[in-house]
Image (cartoon, rainbow, N blue to C red):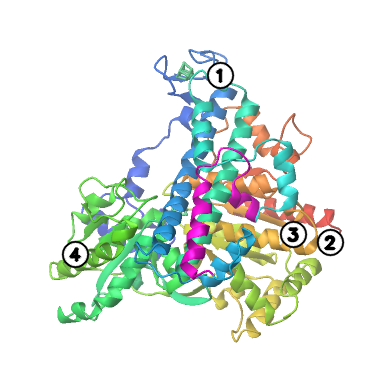
């Protein structure tokens, strides 16, 4: 029997799963089940397909092969696989960043039709880069910044500029000693693939150091560069209010879902939806309604207040409402299964990036210079589909939940400045010192059909809030929290009394009853904002990031991006929890290095960097492991808990 309540706690998604089931439509939840049981060699990371002597796999028991055909051991195979997995996570973000830098360059040159909205951010970056601003136009400065950014994909010596711009001095010191500082993103990606290739690097420790270099590429030339230049192009997010759940899809509107990650695409869809809104009315609709899925949702929520329909695991179910005229996708986390679902309805699935196409979908090509043509053509395609809607198949789950987002570091500082104008971080640090905020945990990453959707994300958040831990959130996890009211001031009912008081005081100073208990800081590339917040706090207190009573968690990870981001935070000395295991358990060396405590083994990240990987499937238990680690860090700082 089919029990939708086993698959997700989102009642709208449950309703649509039943609808899909009755219509004979297969979704990720069905396909994930068909893959069970998962291959145990793959789960442990001990299979190797790196050359045609193989594929090889290492057996677990007494009997069977202990080495691959070339002589590679389990430690070597797992370390090599982890390195390429982290490349798989970091590269989409690096390419995301490069696309934004390229667009900024063409915008500054007057080739691409984007207005530079984030002038403050541009000045700040330019000054941090040591540029002079005098006598220069916005476009001239933007061009210089874009060209320096693009050097992070070319320079052969020195350290990636975006790392130098953002990293805490103490972290850089650690990384320098270990000789893991990246030069340029593309070079390090090539270097990592080269290291992992058959017959190349077979020293597990050297491979793990390669993992950490790739983590720094992810952090600076992926996350930070993407966020910085997106803020320059589209503005730095400010507090906004929007709605969550499938109910944001509206029956009497032309509905366009944007799904993926690249804001240059989604921003143009919004712009053209507003321009062509009248044409929807001419068709008898109330207008055009753009809704978000996954991180495109986050980009538009943060900057435009666009409402969010759903997150990763249930992306196909948005189409099952029968109310989407178009779903526009760009890159990352786009399930190929979407097209088959779209074919059951009038929905047009539209891919946009020249190098990322979806079999069977239509394609409207994005290039920075032709962004307006793309935006207009996409919206016109959606308008054309409206009249083809099959009213018999229409079913939109009712109800939406109010949520706040827009917590950029700039916005957080502004919110806090209402309490202390001269030293905005002071009230926050005071609350941390006094234990009114016990610590901060970032709940980030995905939903994954292998885990009951939204369950682990929300359970972990609630357990931490109860213990006065403030939550910051990004990605699809932030969507989980949004759907269940944790991004709304009402969510403070889940907080311990101390944290609730702090949030009320901060909220009241800003004309709200309270701040929400979880602060939505953006898309997955915006984990850079969390990093910036930590660096700012560490600098203000005069300690390293590794000393702060903070941690990260991805309770329902799906993408290798969750692992590359997690590794980046471990490199800073932040403990990171994952609710599904990384494929490392087949190597005692790799598993111990990442998950062991300081002093336990020859080499641990806990010892070298000050943070480790924590694997725990039970969100309540995970919360308590994180609490212990936070209390340990508080004690080391001489703080009571
Ligand atoms: Ni992040 Fe964003 Fe969602 Fe996971 Fe995918 S959309 S980049 S990887 S699934 S959070
Ligand atoms: Fe097997 Fe070694 Fe080839 Fe991997 S690289 S497939 S372990 S022979």
Q: Which mark is residue 538?
A: 3
Q: Is residue 143 magenta?
A: yes
Kindly state the secondary structure of the residue where label 4 is placed: helix
Kindly state the secondary structure of the residue where label 3 is placed: helix
**CA gap, disc 3 to disc 1?**
47 Å
Q: Pinpoint residue 605: horizontal percent, then vertical percent.
A: 69, 39
Magenta span: 136-165
**CA gap, disc 3 to disc 2?**
15 Å
What residue appears at the point 68 percent right and 79 percent down from the top-left corner?
Answer: 417
**CA gap, disc 2 to disc 1?**
47 Å
Kindly state the secondary structure of the residue where label 2 is placed: loop
Mark 3 vs mark 2, foreground winner is 3
Mark 4 vs mark 1, foreground winner is 4
- Residue 389: quadrant of the picture: bottom left
Mark 3 vs mark 1, foreground winner is 3
**CA gap, disc 2 to disc 4?**
59 Å
Mark found first going from the N terminus, 2 or 4: 4
CA neighbours of label 2 inside 10 A, class few (<14), some (14 to 19), many (20+): some
Q: Which mark is residue 639?
A: 2
Mark found first going from the N terminus, 3 or 1: 1
The residue that label 1 is drawn on is: 61
356 lies left or right of 423: left
Mark found first going from the N terminus, 4 or 1: 1
What residue appears at the point 28 percent right and 67 percent down from the top-left corner?
Answer: 256
**CA gap, disc 4 to disc 1?**
57 Å
CA neighbours of label 3 inside 10 A, class few (<14), some (14 to 19), many (20+): some
Regarding residue 323, the answer to whether it shows in the image is no
């Amino acid at each position: 029997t089919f029990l939708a309540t086993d698959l997700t706690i989102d009642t709208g998604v449950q309703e649509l799963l039943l609808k899909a089931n009755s219509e004979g439509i297969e979704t990720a939840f069905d396909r994930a089940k068909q893959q069970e049981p998962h291959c145990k060699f793959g789960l442990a990371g001990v299979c190797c397909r790196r050359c045609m002597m193989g594929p090889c796999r290492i057996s677990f028991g007494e009997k069977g092969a202990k080495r691959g055909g070339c002589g590679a051991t389990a430690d070597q195979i797992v370390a090599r696989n982890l390195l390429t997995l982290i490349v798989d996570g970091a590269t989409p973000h690096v390419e995301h960043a490069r696309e934004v830098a390229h667009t900024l360059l063409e915008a500054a040159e007057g080739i691409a039709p984007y207005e530079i909205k984030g002038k403050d951010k541009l000045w700040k970056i330019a000054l941090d880069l040591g540029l002079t601003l005098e006598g220069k136009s916005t476009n001239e400065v933007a061009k210089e910044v874009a060209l320096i950014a693009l050097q992070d994909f070319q320079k052969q010596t020195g350290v990636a500029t975006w790392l130098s711009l953002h990293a805490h001095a103490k972290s850089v010191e650690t990384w320098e000693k270990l000789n893991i500082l990246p030069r340029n993103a593309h070079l390090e990606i090539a270097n990592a693939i080269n290291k992992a290739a058959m017959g190349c690097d077979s020293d597990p420790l050297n491979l793990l150091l390669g993992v950490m270099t790739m983590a720094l590429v992810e952090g600076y030339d992926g996350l930070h560069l993407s966020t910085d230049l997106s803020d320059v192009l589209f503005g730095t997010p400010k507090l906004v209010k929007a709605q969550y759940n499938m109910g944001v899809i509206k029956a009497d509107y032309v509905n366009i879902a944007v799904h993926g990650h690249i804001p240059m695409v989604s921003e143009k869809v919004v712009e053209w939806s507003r321009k062509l809104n009248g044409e929807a009315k001419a068709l008898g609709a109330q207008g055009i309604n753009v809704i978000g899925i996954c991180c495109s949702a986050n980009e538009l929520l943060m900057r435009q207040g666009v409402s969010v329909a759903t997150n990763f695991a249930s992306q196909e179910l948005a189409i099952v409402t029968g109310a989407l005229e178009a779903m526009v996708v760009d890159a990352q986390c786009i399930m190929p299964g979407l097209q088959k679902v779209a074919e059951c309805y009038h929905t047009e699935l539209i891919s946009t990036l020249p190098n990322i196409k979806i079999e069977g979908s239509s394609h409207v090509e994005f290039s920075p210079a032709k962004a307006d043509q793309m935006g207009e053509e996409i919206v016109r395609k959606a308008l054309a589909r409206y009249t083809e809607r099959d009213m018999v198949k229409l079913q939109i789950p009712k109800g939406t939940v109010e949520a706040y987002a827009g917590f950029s570091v700039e916005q957080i500082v502004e919110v806090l400045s209402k309490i202390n104008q001269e030293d905005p971080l002071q009230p926050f640090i005071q609350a941390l010192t006094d234990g009114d905020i016990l610590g901060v945990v970032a709940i980030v990453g995905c939903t994954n059909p292998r885990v009951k959707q939204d369950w682990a994300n929300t359970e972990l958040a609630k357990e931490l809030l109860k213990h006065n831990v403030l939550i910051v959130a990004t990605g699809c996890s932030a969507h989980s929290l949004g759907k269940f009211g944790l991004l709304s001031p009402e969510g403070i009912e889940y907080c311990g009394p101390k944290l609730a008081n702090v949030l009320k005081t901060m909220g009241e100073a800003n004309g709200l009853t309270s701040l929400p208990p979880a602060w939505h800081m953006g898309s997955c590339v915006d984990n850079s904002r969390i990093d910036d917040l930590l660096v700012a706090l560490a600098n203000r207190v005069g300690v390293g990031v590794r000393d702060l009573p903070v941690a990260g968690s991805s309770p329902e990870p799906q993408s290798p991006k969750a692992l590359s981001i997690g590794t980046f935070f471990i490199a800073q000395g932040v403990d990171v929890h994952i609710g599904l295991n990384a494929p490392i358990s087949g190597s005692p060396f790799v598993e111990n290095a990442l998950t062991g405590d300081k002093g336990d083994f020859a080499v641990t990240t806990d010892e070298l960097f000050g943070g480790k990987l924590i694997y725990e499937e039970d969100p309540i238990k995970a919360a308590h492991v994180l609490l212990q680690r936070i209390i340990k860090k508080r004690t080391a700082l001489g703080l009571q808990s």
